[in-house]
Structures are given as C-alpha cells and as structure tokens.
Image (cartoon, grey):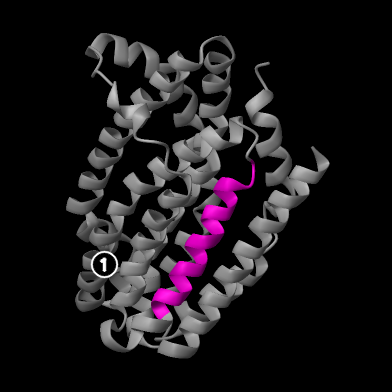
Amino acid sequence: MLRNSLKITVIFGISTFVQLISNIIVTRIFGATINLDIFLAAVTLPTIILTVIYATLNDVFLPLYGEIRTKDKEQANKYLVNSLIFLIFFSVIISLILFFSANHISYFFYKSRGEEFVKNVAFQLSIMTWSLTPSIIATLFGAYFYFDKQYNRFPFAQLMGSMFNLLFIIFFYKTLGIWSLVISFILNIIFQIFFVCRPLKMFLNFKFPNIQYLISSISPLLFSWLPLIVGNFALRSDVLLIRSFGSQLPTGYLVYLNLITKIFSLATGITTIGIQIVLLPHSKK
C-alpha cells in the first residue's frame, strides 16, 4: 500500500508541477495583458467545478461500486454504465444552466472591470462549461481501474492531460491566440479519456433501464455526493473570491495573483491523495 501511495503521490506531484510550469509559460507567452486577465476570470469557475468532481466523485462512487463488484461483477458493470449515463445527462443539464447564465455570473463577479470585460468573460465561460461531461466520464472510468488495483492509470491519464494542455498551447498560441487556452482546457480532459476508456463490449449489451430502477440505483450516489460537492466547492471557492476582488485592480494583476496562488497551493492534497485512492476501493470489504 505504501509503495502504491508513493507512486500515485509522485505522479500527482509531477502533474501539479507541470500545471505550474504551464502557468509560467502562459504568462511568458501572453504577458500580464487584458486577454489573459479575461481568460483567468472565465476559467475560474469551470476549474473549481472540475476539481470538485475529481476530488469527490470517486469518494462516493468507489465504495458503492466496490460493494456491488465484490458480489456480482456483471451487476457492477451495469451499475457503472447506469451511473455514467445518468451523470452524463445530469452534467449536460448543469452545463446548459451555466451556459445560459454565464453573462449573469460574469457580471456578478467582474462587473467592476466594465461591460466589455464581462462580455468576453461570459463568452469564454459559456464554452468551457462543456468540460463537465468529459470530466465525469474520465472520473468514472478511472474508478474502474482503481478497484482493479491499477492505481496509476487515472493519475497517469491526468498527467498526460496536463502535458497535452501545455504542448497544445505552445504549438497553437500563435495561430489561435488566447483561444488556444480555452480550447486546450476542454481537449485536455477529453484526451484523458483515451487513457482510461473501457472496452466497448461493456456497453454493447446495455439496455436502458426503466426510470424507477435508474433512480433507485443512482439515488444513494447522488445523496452521498451532493454534500461533498457543497463542502468541497466552499473550500475551493477562495480562488473565485481572489479573482473577483482582484478584478478591481489594474490590468495584469489577475495574472500575478494566479501565479502566487498556484505556487502556494502546489503541495495541497498531494501527500494524502495517494493513501485515499488506495484505501477507498476496499473500504466496504
């Protein structure tokens, strides 16, 4: 267990370090400009939501999935597919809500920077809200490997996603400009799915269950997950507050604040996440 925890901790540490390097390179490429300020304001909420999904969904899904898996592997696969389909539908609904309310959200947090700033933030935010669905797919597929004791698979996928994000920005910033950051934010998560995707045969025999059965099987997951979402979101909302208040400062200060917060949060959670991942699949055994 100690060896597996150490491996996962190292992988997450490298991934976090790559993200920090990415932020430094992005700052060097775009400078402390209004365009980068706009992107940092727009990406804040999607980043928090994705971080919450990665940090909490496995916490509730793994014990429930593991309890079923120890009794009936076929039933566990069915539960995984049902959960995936339901949460995809759930994430699309949330994405639609965020998409249509992007202007109101941007105005609430960044109105001090003016209408043009808010308009641009809202447009980029509305695009990046569609990253929720691939993040849920990647997380649930990753849970399958965690339970099979392939602990390195999903952390490695996230590391590859971070590397892809950095390389995409380096190769396309000249042609796409600031939109290379927006596009890479979404493609990064989609790229992770290729490292954790399950065989198609798991879905070939799938029959859509009746609504009553689907709700009864998924409701324990939702009721356990929602309190974690609220609590974890509250813990991570400091970045949103920092950038909201920072938007009242002159152009470029959001860039400086972003680098400072990234440096100070570099070690947060890295030392404990390895142990957590190793223990969760076996918590119901």
Image quadrant holding the C terminus, namely top right
Stretch in magenta: 151-169
Dominant SS in magenta: helix
Residue count near mark 1 (Cα–Cα under 10 Å), binned few <14, some 14–19, many ≥20: many
- Between residue 92 and residue 111, name the one nearer to us: 92
Image x and y of residue 184, in percent: 36, 68
Residue at the spot of label 1: 124
Image x and y of residue 154, in percent: 55, 47
- Between residue 53 and residue 245, name the one nearer to us: 53
| Residue type for callout 1 | Gln
Count all numbered tags in the image, as a single digit.
1
In terms of secondary structure, where does tag 1 sit?
helix
Q: Would you say residue 32 is visible in this rendering?
A: no
Left or right: where 155 falls relative to 119 = right
Taking the spot 35% from the left edge, 29% from the top edge, the residue there is 201
Q: Residue furthest right?
A: 2
Taking the spot 58% from the left edge, 47% from the top edge, the residue there is 153
Q: In which quadrant of the rendered view does residue 203 lie?
A: top left
Magenta stretch holds residue 157: yes
Q: Would you say residue 266 is visible in this rendering?
A: yes
Up the image or down, 161 lies above or below 152; here it is: below
Left or right: where 193 falls relative to 178 = right
Image quadrant holding the N terminus, namely top right
Taking the spot 49% from the left edge, 89% from the top edge, the residue there is 28
Magenta stretch holds residue 207: no
Q: In which quadrant of the rendered view does residue 106 lie?
A: bottom left
Up the image or down, 96 lies above or below 41; here it is: above
- Between residue 115 and residue 177, name the one nearer to us: 177
Image x and y of residue 96, in percent: 20, 46
Image x and y of residue 107, in percent: 26, 63
Taking the spot 63% from the left edge, 47% from the top edge, the residue there is 152
Up the image or down, 266 lies above or below 279; here it is: below
